[in-house]
Image (tube, helix red, strand yellow):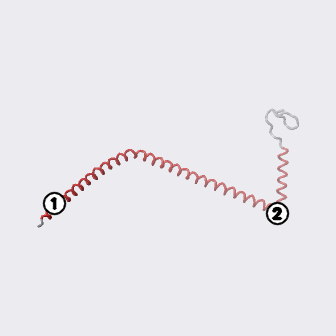
Amino acid sequence: MPPNTETVLTVIAGALVFQALVLLGALAWAWSASRRLGERLDRLERDVRPRLDSVTDGFARVADGVSRLSEDAQRQLASVESAVNEATGRVRTTGETVERVTRHPAGLLAAALALTVARRFTSRRPAAAAPGVAAPGGASPGV
């Protein structure tokens, strides 16, 4: 074996030992850093968790409120729709009645006669006067 071979093998062995020590040091540093990072994350989670829970609860309450408002709006919409349908039905019935009366002259004459009689009847009836107010014709009430 040439004399340089021992030197080269010694340098290679020393380099391998040095490389192993560097890798072990890097592994120890990475393990320590990951442990510290884990502890910081745990602390951060403990600090942030209550705030996050309160925000989540707030969103849940808002969602519940919006849901109740939506249900109320749906009920109101159904009520309005029912009232519109009822009013539409009444308008149709009134239109049909008017059309039926105006198509038949006898019906129109009867309606006019009934209206005239009703007006005369209401105009002849004495109106109830409020206390202390003179009734038509100058007489005071109760006299």
Identity of the residue drawn at 27% across and 51% down: 29
**Of callouts 1 and 2, which one flags the residue occurring earlier in the amino acid sequence?**
1
In the current view of this chain or complex, which residue is farthest to the right?
Answer: 137
In the current view of this chain or complex, which residue is farthest to the bottom?
Answer: 1
From the image, which quarter does the N terminus lie in? bottom left
The image shows residue 62 at horizontal and vertical percentages of: 51, 48
Q: Is residue 113 left or right of residue 12?
A: right
Q: Amino acid at mark 2?
A: His
Q: Is residue 51 left or right of residue 85?
A: left
Q: Residues within 10 Å of mark 2 (few under 14, many from 20)?
A: few
SS at mark 2 in the image: loop
Q: Which residue is mark 2?
A: 104
In the foreground, 96 or 50: 50
> For the image shown, how many numbered marks are present on the structure?
2
Q: Amino acid at mark 1?
A: Thr
110 versus 39 height, above or below: below
From the image, which quarter does the C terminus lie in? top right
The image shows residue 36 at horizontal and vertical percentages of: 31, 48
In the current view of this chain or complex, which residue is farthest to the front?
Answer: 3
Q: Is residue 5 left or right of residue 100?
A: left
What is the quadrant of residue 86 in the picture? Answer: bottom right
Mark in front: 1 vs 2? 1
Q: Which residue is mark 1?
A: 10
The image shows residue 101 at horizontal and vertical percentages of: 80, 60
Kindly identify which numbered label has been placed on residue 69.
none
Identity of the residue drawn at 79% across and 36% down: 130
SS at mark 1 in the image: helix
Distance from label 1 to label 2 (Cα)? Answer: 130 Å
